[in-house]
Image: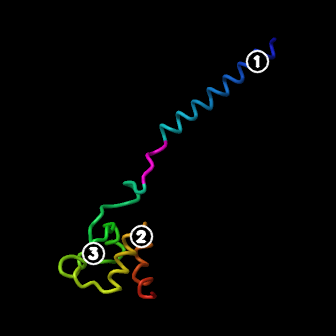
Amino acid sequence: MRYLAALAIAASLIFMVFWGGAKIVKLVDPPHRDYNDYTVGRQMNLCGYRVDYRHFGGGYDLNRWRGGRCESLSKLDRCILQCLSEAGTVRIGAACFNDCVRK
């Protein structure tokens, strides 16, 4: 009878530990989003492409893709803007020009 009581107590303690751990994980786990405030900066709309403003620090003058230039974009411009809109980091964005020139 003692073994059965000890087994019941051990099983309930194990259940409480796992249940408490699951509650802690839910409290600590951030919301699931594609982008969060720590990895993505402010977004700009350049000729219809959503580009992270941090790519300005990667060597690009983002202001030159504003205004009338959007009406006459070259293939290189479109490639760079597409690459910048998909680039997740400044380092990847800095390589967009070289990648588009190779294409």
Dot 1 or dot 3: first in sequence order is 1
Q: Check disc 1 and report the residue beneath it.
A: 6
Kindly state the secondary structure of the residue where label 1 is placed: helix
Q: Residue at x 31, y 71 (%)?
A: 49
Q: Is residue 23 above or below residue 8?
A: below
Q: Residue at horizontal 27%, vertical 66%?
A: 44
Residue 42 locus on image (x, y percent): 30, 61
Give the residue type at disc 3. Answer: Leu
- Is residue 78 positioned above or below 44 on the image? below
- Whole-percent x, y for residue 19 in the image: 59, 30
Range of magenta residues: 29-33
Q: Amino acid at mark 2?
A: Ala
The numbered disc on residue 62 is 3
Q: Amino acid at mark 1?
A: Ala
Give how far across and how far down residue 55 sits, in percent: 35, 71
Instruction: Tell me whether the residue at label 1 lies in contact with that at label 3, contact meaning CB atoms closer than 8 angstroms.
Output: no
